[in-house]
Structure formats: C-alpha cells, structure tokens
Amino acid sequence: MNNGNLFSKCLRDLLLCNDVVTVPGLGCFIAQNMPASFSDKCSTINPPYRKLFFRAVQKGDPHLFVGHLATMLDDSQEASVWLYAFIKDFKAELDRSKKMPLEGLGYMRATSQNDYFFVADDDLDIYPEGMGLESVTIKSKVEPVLKPEPIAEPEHEPISEPQPEPQPEIEPISEPEREPEREPEREPEPESEPVPEPEPALEPEPILEEPQPESISEPELQLKPEQEPIQEPEIKAKRPRKKLPWWAVLLIVMVSILLVLVVIIAFREQLPWGETIDDLLNKLLYTEEELMLLNL
C-alpha cells in the first residue's frame, strides 16, 4: 500500500464514526448528515446520506488522526514523522498540479491562489446507518386521454352559376340602292352665221423692257473641318491585392487573444480589476459544485 492509499484509508476509517477529523498541517474534514430529499423533477426520493467537505482550519482533536495512524504503522513516533513528510509532499504536489486524489473519498483541489477544497465522489458512502437504502421512483397513474371523434362536416352542394342569356342577333340594315343619275340631253346648237373678215390690225409699238436687277450672290458658307475625337487615356486596371487565407487570419486572431490573456494574467495583481480576473479564472477552472465548496 502506497503512502496516498494509507492516508486515504486512515481518513475514511475515522470518518465512519466521527463527524470531524483533523489532519495536522492540512485542515479538518467534516461529515454532515443530510436528510432524504426529492429529485429536481419530484419523481425520485433520494435516501439520507452524509456530506463530506473540507476546511483549512484546525478544529477538533489533532491527536485522533495520529493515534489511528500509529495503530496502522505499529509505531507512534514513526507515525508523526511519516505524517509530517507526507503532508509536506502532498501540499507541494497539490500547489503544482491543482488536484490530488483521495482513494475511496474524492479528490483535493487548489485554486489559483492555492486555497484548498475537497470534492467528494458521486458514489461516496460514509453513512453506515443508511446501508441498503436506495432511491425510490414515484410512478404516477396516467389516465388514457380519449381522442375526440372527428365531426363530419356537412357536404355543400355546388352552387350553379347563372348562365348568361344569349343576346339576339342584330341583322344588318341594308342601304337602299341608288339609281344612276341620267345626264341631261344636250340641245342641238344653232347654225353659226358667216363672220365678216377682220380689218388689218395696227402693229403695236415696242415696249421697252425695264432692266432687271442683278442677283446678289450670297457668300458660300465655309464648312468647318470635323474635329477628331479625343482619345481618352486608358486606365490601367489595378491588380487586386492578394487576400490572406481564412486559416491565417484565424491563427493571427488566436495568437493575439493568447498574448492579451498572458499579459493580463501576468499583471493582474497590479490592475484595479485583478480580483475580477481571478474570479473569472476560477469559473473556467472549477465546476459550480467546487466553487460552492470554496464559499463554505
């Protein structure tokens, strides 16, 4: 049996018949009787049990643990030396790894400020009077619920839409035929009488023609030469910048966050909100049950 198992067995034997067991140099383990209780959903009755927790104070008889250890080692002087050396190594390893197991009981934990507390196993049994008691499940009678019968809906007769009455056909009105107009008959022209020969006409005097004004030539419009279209300078397309891949961006963000966290943790005692950082670290490192045990 190694030193850790020997320490755990000695502590368990004393807790079966004592409510407080003090370990010199470490603290005291307190066992508290808890009554029967209902589960969260009130469907199970849990039997009574003993709850075990730890306090870093010297309470009770310090010779109780040393005396029982001496009976196991058959030497009282060797028991004191052995216990002193074991507690020294136990606390150093607990400060380093933040967790030390106690076989058959649970395990010890340490916070970031090296405050010690105890977490019991789920199946811890240090209550001899409750031996054989088991959880009882309450079964409630469930009456079958009758499904309502579906109500048949009355069938609706199809409503016939009124058909439009046929409109009477309108016969086209025939226009009356026009009679062709008759041309009036021409009357016969009377015979013309002989016309006497005309006398010789006098020659008319020549009429002087007025000089016509010379036409003023309009100046020809000079056509302006067509302007050549101005060629716009070609704009060279800018080459798009190469984007970083997503994994590189994610890696840069994670490294930045880690650097910020390391700086905050390293200088948290000098910051005004250093206690808030310690509380946040405790919530990340420990469960709710362990934090409740720390507040005892």
Image: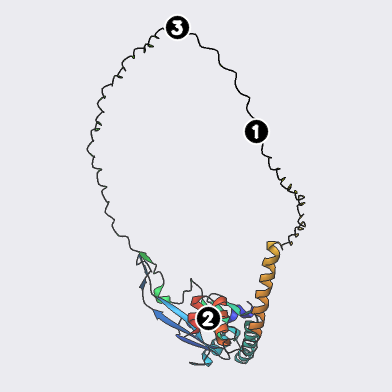
Q: Is residue 124 above or below residue 96?
A: above
Left or right: residue 124 versus residue 260 is: left
Q: Which mark is residue 207?
A: 1
* Total number of numbered discs in the rendering: 3
Q: Which residue matches tag 2?
A: 118
Residue count near mark 1 (Cα–Cα under 10 Å), binned few <14, some 14–19, many ≥20: few
Q: Is residue 280 above or below residue 206?
A: below
Q: Which mark is residue 191?
A: 3
Q: Which mark is residue 171?
A: none
Reading the chain from its start, which is encountered first: label 3 or label 2?
A: 2
Q: Secondary structure at mark 1?
A: loop
Reading the chain from its start, which is encountered first: label 1 or label 3?
A: 3
Residue pictured at 45% horizontal, 6% vertical: 191
What residue type is disc 3 on?
A: Glu
Label 2 to label 1: alpha-carbon separation: 150 Å
Q: Nearer the viewer, residue 62 or 209?
A: 209
Q: Nearer the viewer, mark 1 or mark 3?
A: 1
Reading the chain from its start, which is encountered first: label 2 or label 1?
A: 2
Left or right: residue 154 versus residue 125 is: left
Task: Identify the image quadrant of residue 215.
Answer: top right
